[in-house]
Amino acid sequence: MAVLDRVARGLELLLELISGILIVGLTAVVVYAVVWRYAGGSSPRWYDEIASIMLVWLTYYAGALAALKRGHIGVDGVLLMLPQTLRMAAAVLTEILVIAFFALLAWMGLVVLDILGGMTLVSLRWVPVTFTQSVIPIGAALFIIAQLLSMPRHLAKVRAGISQHQEEIDQAVAGAGELVEDEPPHEDRKGRP
């Protein structure tokens, strides 16, 4: 598992970097357009199209990051109520369905790229639509990789009957408790503890 953990950590850092760059870039584009609108009376022609594309890219890359961290919405409480044999079968089936969905999305994304070949953005004629839409198969493939890398740890928790969401809550509460313990005692206005 050490090799998988290192690969997962590398992918996590890469996805965090890409997502961070996209957030900063999207913020810069929106702020630029707002300033331009107030200074000159109208936004640049390309602003809306580029901001929309950046938001979609951010969604795909951050979604893969969330999949790697198993941060997507789930109801593991229901799963953990099942007997272990059924619980494991349901967990494996869920993994297969998620991977199959994203494999289909990647395949259809490639079909879409073929259909859109030769087209360019409306506002920036030098940017091919295939470049902007390449995020569909790339994002789907990243999601599959993230799912596969996080699957062994997830299935081990399911087998052991550990709720990931409860574990995260317990860690957050423990962390908050440590913060409170580290604070110096508060004094009232007269300097008394």
Image: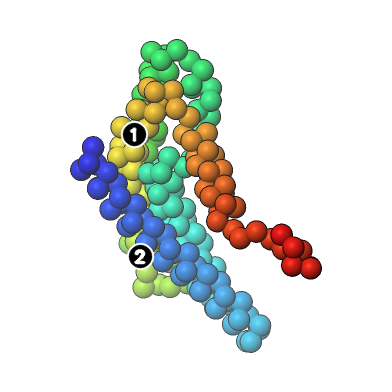
For discs 1 and 2, the disc positioned in front in the rendered view: 1
Residue 152 x %, y %: 31, 32
One can see residue 138 in this view? no
The quadrant holding residue 182 is bottom right
**Who is closer to the viewer here, 79 or 98?**
79
Tell whether 43 sits left or right of 50: right
Residue 128 x %, y %: 35, 65
Q: Which residue sits furthest bottom?
A: 39
Q: How far apart are marks 1 and 2 (CA)?
A: 40 Å
Query: Tag 2 or tag 1, which sits nearer the N-term?
Result: 2
Tell whether 182 sits left or right of 190: left
Where does label 1 land, which residue?
A: 153
Could you tell me which residue is drawn at 32 percent across and 57 percent down? 14
Q: Give the vertical position of 121 relative to 16 (above or below).
A: below
Where does label 2 land, which residue?
A: 128
The quadrant holding residue 70 is top left
Tell whether 86 sits left or right of 37: left
Q: Which residue sits furthest right?
A: 190
User: Could you tell me the amino acid type at mark 1?
Assistant: Arg
Image quarter hosting the N terminus: top left
**Who is closer to the viewer here, 179 or 52?**
179
Residue 54 x %, y %: 46, 62
Colour scheme employed for the rendering of this structure: rainbow
Q: How crowded is mark 2: few (under 14 residues within 10 Å), some or many (20 or more)?
A: some
